Image (tube, helix red, strand yellow):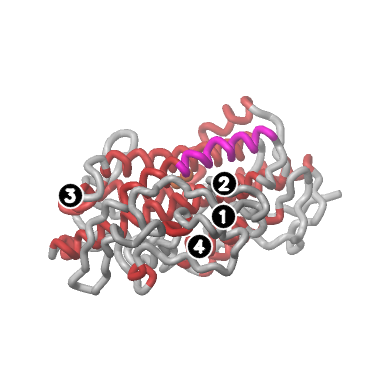
């Protein structure tokens, strides 16, 4: 039994990153775990940039743990690490302009006008943005360190840190992984969590109406692109409102992703990691869900984007219904239950990647970026609980 892991875990610096081939195109269907460990360690050794920070820790990590990971668990944790890197990147941009810049979350100098517009949603918005950013950074660093400690390759997106920063006052001028200036935000999670009769896992064709339909019809900035975006006031408030709904949209995705992938984790410790990080995403979501309901009803005079008053929309839109309304779960023959939804595990990783792509978060990234991310998602979705080998669907 052999494993040809090749370079399947890492993009290369030059020429263009090649990403991960799908199962069967470079990875034998049955994996020898010792071989995986040996080659995984070799792959980890080729990492530069992003993993450079971890390089100094690698020896200590190896001494802490000399065991190995099931390949399926490694694939799931690596995909989650990649998404956490992307989350950190977007939250970092928000923090530089609208959060609190300090030793815990360094970078940027703040944009007073944008910060003030965010405070219309809650007077603690800047603290919450700071803390969410710090959380994502620790998720990213922990998951990659855990992979390295077990001889598996970490996720590495450093070659793709090429997108432009905001030119508004307060932002660092560095390469970014995510684009917060042309977002198309699907706010249907708002009614998905209020609807007592439909569950996306049981009703995959049911269309949950969005809270802010306008955010689905165009490309909108969630941060000021330049200081020209700081006026007129309703334009800036619409940008802050877009951010407020985007925060919750991102975190509800994480709230579903972790339980979805947990169902296919094999090792108890790897499961513990997924079950311990996942609920922090739910805590983020719950917070942002509450704050989004405070977004002032405004129309952006520059592009017509309207944030409606949700007060009179009935239960499906009621602002203070921020706890999950009980809904059908697993079977309509069972009693309704207050749950996270969706949690279907089949294709969950690719679904998450498609969700982030559809919102425009990666606008401007090259094909090699999507190739790499799709490769990680394919491997994560090929993992099976209780199995020590990857397999096709
Ligand atoms: Fe996270
Ligand atoms: Fe998160």
Instruction: Residue 110: give its label.
Output: none
Q: Is residue 287 above or below residue 62?
A: below
Which of discs 4 and 2 lies nearer the camera? The answer is 2
Mark 4 → mark 2, Cα distance in angstroms: 25 Å
The residue lying at 53 percent from left, 45 percent from top is: 338
Judge the density around disc 2: few (<14), some (14-19), many (≥20) Cα neighbours within 10 Å.
Answer: some
Does dot 3 land on a helix, a strand or a loop?
A: helix
Quarter of the rendering containing residue 106: top left
- Give the residue number, with chain letter if any, for mark 2: 337
Mark 3 → mark 4, Cα distance in angstroms: 30 Å
- Give the residue number, with chain letter if any, for mark 4: 355
- Give the residue number, with chain letter if any, for mark 3: 116
Measured from the top left, where is residue 159 in percent x and y?
48, 57
Look at the image and give the residue range highlighted in magenta.
Answer: 268-282
Nearer to the camera, 342 or 376: 342
Horizontal side of 110 relative to 383 (left or right) equals: left
Q: Is residue 165 visible?
A: yes
């Amino acid at each position: 039994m052999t494993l040809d892991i090749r370079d399947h875990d890492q993009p290369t610096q030059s020429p263009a990153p090649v990403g991960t081939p799908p199962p069967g195109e470079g990875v034998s269907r049955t994996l020898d775990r010792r071989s995986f460990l040996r080659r995984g360690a070799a792959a980890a050794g080729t990492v530069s940039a992003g993993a450079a920070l971890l390089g100094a820790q690698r020896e200590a990590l190896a001494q802490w743990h000399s065991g190995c990971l099931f390949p399926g668990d490694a694939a799931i944790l690596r995909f989650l690490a990649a998404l956490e890197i992307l989350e950190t990147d977007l939250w970092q941009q928000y923090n530089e302009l609208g959060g609190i810049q300090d030793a815990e979350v360094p970078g940027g100098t703040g944009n007073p006008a944008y910060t003030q517009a965010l405070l219309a949603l809650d007077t603690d918005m800047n603290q919450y943005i700071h803390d969410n950013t710090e959380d994502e950074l620790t998720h990213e660093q922990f998951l990659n360190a855990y992979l390295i400690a077990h001889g598996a390759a970490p996720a590495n997106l450093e070659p793709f840190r090429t997108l432009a920063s905001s030119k508004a006052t307060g932002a660092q001028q560095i390469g970014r992984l995510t684009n917060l200036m042309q977002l198309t935000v699907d706010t249907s999670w708002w009614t998905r969590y209020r609807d007592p009769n439909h569950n996306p896992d049981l009703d995959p064709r049911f269309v949950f109406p969005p809270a802010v339909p306008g955010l689905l019809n165009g490309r909108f900035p969630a941060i000021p692109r330049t200081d020209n975006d700081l006026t007129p006031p309703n334009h800036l408030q619409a940008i802050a409102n877009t951010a407020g709904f985007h925060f919750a949209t991102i975190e509800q995705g994480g709230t579903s992703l972790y339980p979805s992938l947990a169902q296919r984790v094999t090792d108890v410790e790897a499961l513990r990691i997924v079950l311990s990080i996942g609920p922090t995403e739910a805590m983020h979501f719950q917070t942002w869900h509450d704050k989004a309901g405070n977004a002032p009803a405004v129309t952006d005079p520059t592009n017509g984007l309207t944030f409606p008053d949700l007060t009179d929309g009935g239960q499906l839109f009621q602002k203070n219904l921020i706890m999950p309304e009980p809904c059908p779960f697993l079977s309509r023959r069972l009693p309704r239950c207050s749950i996270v939804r969706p949690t279907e595990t089949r294709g969950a990783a690719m679904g998450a990647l498609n969700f982030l792509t559809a919102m425009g978060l990666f606008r401007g990234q090259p094909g090699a970026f999507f190739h790499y991310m799709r490769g990680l998602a394919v491997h994560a979705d090929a993992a099976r609980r209780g199995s020590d080998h990857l397999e096709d669907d």
